[in-house]
Amino acid sequence: MIKGLDHIVLFCKDTEKSKEWYTNAGFQYSHGYEGMHWFHLGSGLVMLHPAGETSPGITEVHAAVENVNKLFQFVTENGLTPIDHQNGNKTLTEPVTRPWGDIQFELEDLDGHRWAFTQRGE
């Protein structure tokens, strides 16, 4: 039956600019074909697909990370702005610890897709 996630498709107005954004966010590039780009996400992939219009809605994808502080530093050094959507998209200077113990920060890509990078609390 179902054995796991193959890939998530995100529709993007400019997949070349989005490819750069995802690289700056720390995603590892897998491959590309005719304007489509795939990045590794655990055992699955994220696919950037060209689209004239985008409508991300309120979807937020949570990616598990081993060291949230190291990734936070990496994305800020690459010019991205971590936010906290639970506090009105407030710009963060460090990851936040949620009441349930997870440590995380969020990023919003060029098409409004929201990502939370989460390290499980102990």
Image: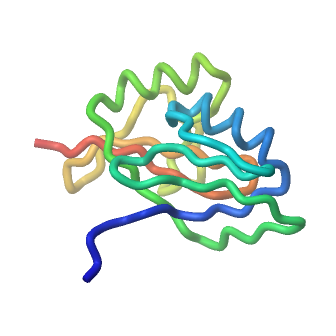
At 41% across and 44% down in the image, what residue appears? 117
Residue toward you, 29 or 104 = 29
Picture quadrant of residue 57: bottom right
Image point (57%, 23%), residue name: 76
Is residue 81 found left or right of 35 in the rendered image? left
Percent position of residue 39, x then y: 54, 44
Q: Is 93 or 6 nearer to us in this picture?
A: 6
Q: Residue furthest top?
A: 77
In this picture, is 106 found above or below 80? below
Quadrant where the C terminus sits is top left
Instruction: Kindly indicate the quadrant of the structure image that contains residue 19.
Output: top right
Query: Residue farthest to the front?
Result: 33
Point 32% across, 38% down: residue: 65
Q: Quadrant of residue 121?
A: top left
Q: Where is residue 119 in the image (x, y as percent from the top left)?
A: 27, 41
Q: Nearer the viewer, residue 29 or 107?
A: 29
The residue positioned farthest toward the right in the image shown: 52
For the N terminus, the image quarter is: bottom left
Q: Is residue 44 left or right of residue 97?
A: right
Of residues 9 and 115, the one drawn nearer to the viewer in this rendering:
9
**Coloring scheme of the render?**
rainbow
Q: Position of residue 120 (x, y in %)?
A: 21, 45
Relative to residue 93, is residue 91 drawn left or right? right
Total residue callouts: 0
Return the residue found at the far bottom. 1
Q: Please, is residue 32 above or below residue 70 in the view?
A: below
**Is 86 drawn above or below residue 31 in the view shown?**
below
